[in-house]
Structure formats: C-alpha cells, structure tokens
Image (tube, rainbow, N blue to C red):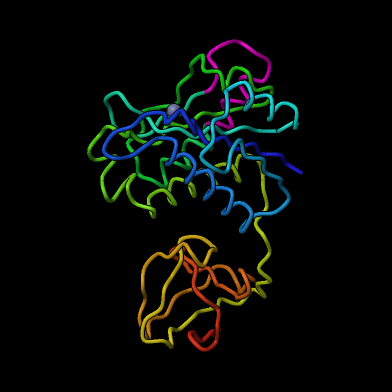
Amino acid sequence: MTKLFIDAGHGGSDPGATANGLKEKDLTLEIALKLRNILNNEYEGHSLMLSRTTDQSVTLSFRTNMANNWGADYLVSIHINAGGGTGFESYTYNGSYPGKAETNRLRGIVHNAIVAETEFRDRGKKEANFHMVRESAMPAVLTENGFIDNASDAAAAALKSDAFLTKIARGHAEGLASALGLSRKDGGNDGEQGYVEILADSLWTYNTANWDDKAVIVNKDEVFTVIRDKFPVGGGHMYQIKSGLYITANPNYVRYYTK
Ligand SMILES: [Zn+2]
C-alpha cells in the first residue's frame, strides 16, 4: 500500500500569495481535493493523507510531522507562484541527503506530467531549501502551479477556471500514479471497444467522477469512445470517454454499444 501525503499550501490566517482576486490558499485546496478525488476514483492500492481539507491554519512543522509520523512514501506540496513570471516549476531539497537521486528521478516524472497536461511554460526542475522538502523524511516535491500575479496565468481560462484547476490536479495524479506505480481500477472491460451514443437532447459531461464537477454539454446523436467501462458513482454510474471527461451511464440518456 503506497502512502501519499498531499499538502495544500497555506490556509486559514495564511492566504499565501494574493492577486487578481485570487488567494493561493483557495487554489491549492481546490487542486488538492481534486487530486484526492481523481486518485481515489481512478486508482487503487494506495492510501492518501491530506494536510488539510478545509480553509484552516496549519504550521509547516505540523504538516511534515503528520507525513513523517504516518510514514508516507511520498509527499507533494501544492503551491501557486508569485513575484513576476509565468508557468510551472517544481522543487526538491537542495541539500545532500540519501536518496537524492531517486527523489529527483520521481520528481522528473511528476513534473513532466503536469507540464504535459496543463501546457504551462516549463520553468524547470529546481532545488531549494524549503521546509516542506527539507523536513519530510520521504521523497518530496513542491509544485508551483502558475503565477497568481501574472495576468495570463490568472486569467479566466487559467487559474480562475475550475476546469483548468482540474487539469493541474490531473497532471499531478497522472505523474504521481506513474512515479509511484499506482494501478488503475479495473472497470471490468471485456476487451471490446465500447461507445456511447447520446440519446438525450443535451447532456452534461464531468471533469472528474463527481456529479458536481460539470464540464461541457454534449448533444443528441453524438458518439464517444469509452475508455473506462461503467463504474458506480454516488448512487448512479458513469463511463469515462476518450477526451478524459465522464458521462452518465444511465440507459435513459445514453446507449452503450460495441462494434
Ligand atoms: Zn505558497
């Protein structure tokens, strides 16, 4: 059982960086919760601990003590940058310590997945003397996901967009799953390619396997390739389709078929 510690930077009386009507503490929490949901809905064989799941003050020492006492295998600390610049960068500890090469190897996998998913400008894989990466007893990475004070990073289509925060979370999830060797849940696929045809006049899709996380509307007669067979979600069922989005599996609204 791989133990992953997810740290949403800042919180409570510490807003982190603020600009463009955004607070770092809110964005990091949103991303952390989305990351938790994606990993729990789509992967198995791991357990997660979060430093916070609400807007609360948590000291840096409390965070690393939590992760160390739990015996986490990996720690990710989620932040938003500020101070002039644009794009994504990640940090590991700049000291010398056993396992540094492995820490940086794992970080490379996570870093590249986030850049690929978000299409952020890649500012590089960096090292620094930050508490979260220095005081954690396991391999750890701190991610800086765009600049809150940069107009284009903070734009309506970027950090102000729920769908973009989902992309950041999905980049983290895919990178962490690949770095830590998490296995995808078996949707019971029998090997035949499945499709869904939309029967309703219009129908919501979802960013994650969560009925509250609405993405875009699709229309009657559209057909989508299914990449994950029907699985239970909150009293109903969903398919995942090729775009990565999710859609209801209710036969009143969609028709499933194989060719
Ligand atoms: Zn921060």
x, y percent for residue 252: 51, 89
For the record, the magenta segment spans 92-107
Q: Residue furthest left?
A: 151
Count of marks placed on residues: 0
Which quarter holds ligand 1?
Answer: top left
Q: Position of residue 224 (x, y in %)?
A: 44, 75
Q: Residue at x 47, y 32 (%)?
A: 143
Question: Which quarter shows the N terminus?
Answer: top right
**Is-magenta flag for residue 77?**
no
Q: Is residue 103 magenta?
A: yes
Q: Quadrant of residue 153?
A: top left
Residue 74 on image: x %, y %: 65, 33
Q: Decide which of 130, 120 is in the foreground and name it.
A: 130
Which one is nearer the viewer's eye here, 51 or 99?
51
Q: Quadrant of residue 233?
A: bottom right
At a point 55% along the width and 29% down the height, the residue shown is: 141
Q: Is residue 211 left or right of residue 15?
A: right
Residue situated in front as seen by the camera: 123 or 141: 141
Is residue 70 rendered to the left or right of residue 19? Answer: right
Q: Is residue 66 above or below residue 208?
A: above
